[in-house]
């Protein structure tokens, strides 16, 4: 006799078989002792060379303590960075990734909303929680809005 168990997993949102984002509870909370503050992060060199200026979007290299803490949790060679978003981001698709998803851990949410788009319409919106890991589909057009303070996060990608 087969036992079937249905489990409801929060924040997994398939629309037309597409996963926009989900909470990844297999990853640990990052200890505050290995995280840098926004002020410390912004003293580093911005390594983002896209169209958005530093006043809107920036990427900074992660500190050694953070890299050493996170690396064992990923079974692929990963790039770990700090991401700072200060103003709304227009709909876009992330480029230069080996995968459709990247991991995002919000240190400060900035009260922001992340939207996913299809046919020029918002089809899903998520207000991500702080100190929570998300796997986010960045191969689908998405945007960020409603930023009231700088959104600081750790991102992990291939």
Image (cartoon, grey):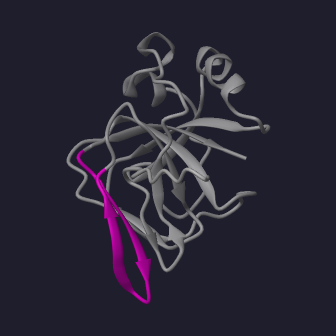
Which percent across, then down, holds residue 13?
42, 64
Image x and y of residue 12, in percent: 44, 57
Residue 38, quarter of picture:
top left
Residue 100 in sight from this viewpoint: yes
Most distant residue in the front direction: 1
Please identify the residue farthest to the bottom as the structure is shown.
119
Q: Is residue 120 magenta?
A: yes
On screen, residue 52 versus residue 8, left or right, reads right
- What percent of the width, then of the height, locates residue 102? 59, 50
Asked if 151 appears above or below 65 in the picture, the reply is below
Q: Is residue 33 above or below residue 94?
A: above
Residue interval drawn in magenta: 111-127
Instruction: Please say whether residue 53 is visible from this viewpoint.
Output: no
Q: Is the stretch drawn in magenta largely helix, strand or loop? A: strand
Please give left or right for residue 76 compared with residue 146 in the image. right
Residue at the image point whose x is 25% and y is 52% from the top:
147
Task: Tell me the residue at 55%/33% (across/down).
Answer: 26
Q: Nearer the viewer, residue 101 or 141?
A: 101
Q: Does residue 19 sit above or below 128 in this rendering?
A: below
Q: Looking at this view, is 3 or 56 the one in front?
A: 3
User: Which residue of the protein is positioned furthest toward the right in this rendering?
Assistant: 77
Q: How many marks?
A: 0
Q: Residue at x 55, y 50 (%)?
A: 3
Image position, residue 8 (x, y; %)? 39, 52
């Amino acid at each position: 006799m087969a036992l079937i168990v249905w489990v409801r997993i929060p924040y997994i949102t398939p629309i037309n078989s597409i996963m926009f984002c989900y909470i990844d509870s297999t990853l640990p909370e990052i200890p505050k002792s290995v995280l840098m503050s926004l002020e410390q992060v912004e003293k580093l060199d911005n390594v983002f060379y896209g169209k958005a200026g530093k006043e809107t979007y920036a990427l900074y290299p992660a500190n050694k303590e953070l890299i050493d803490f996170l690396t064992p949790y990923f079974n692929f060679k990963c790039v770990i960075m700090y991401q700072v978003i200060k103003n709304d981001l227009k709909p876009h698709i992330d480029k230069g990734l080996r995968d459709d998803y990247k991991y995002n851990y919000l240190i400060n949410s900035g009260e922001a909303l992340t939207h996913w788009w299809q046919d020029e319409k918002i089809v899903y919106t998520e207000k991500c929680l702080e100190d929570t890991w998300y796997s986010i589909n960045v191969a689908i057009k998405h945007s960020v809005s409603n930023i009231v303070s700088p959104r600081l996060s750790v991102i992990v990608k291939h």
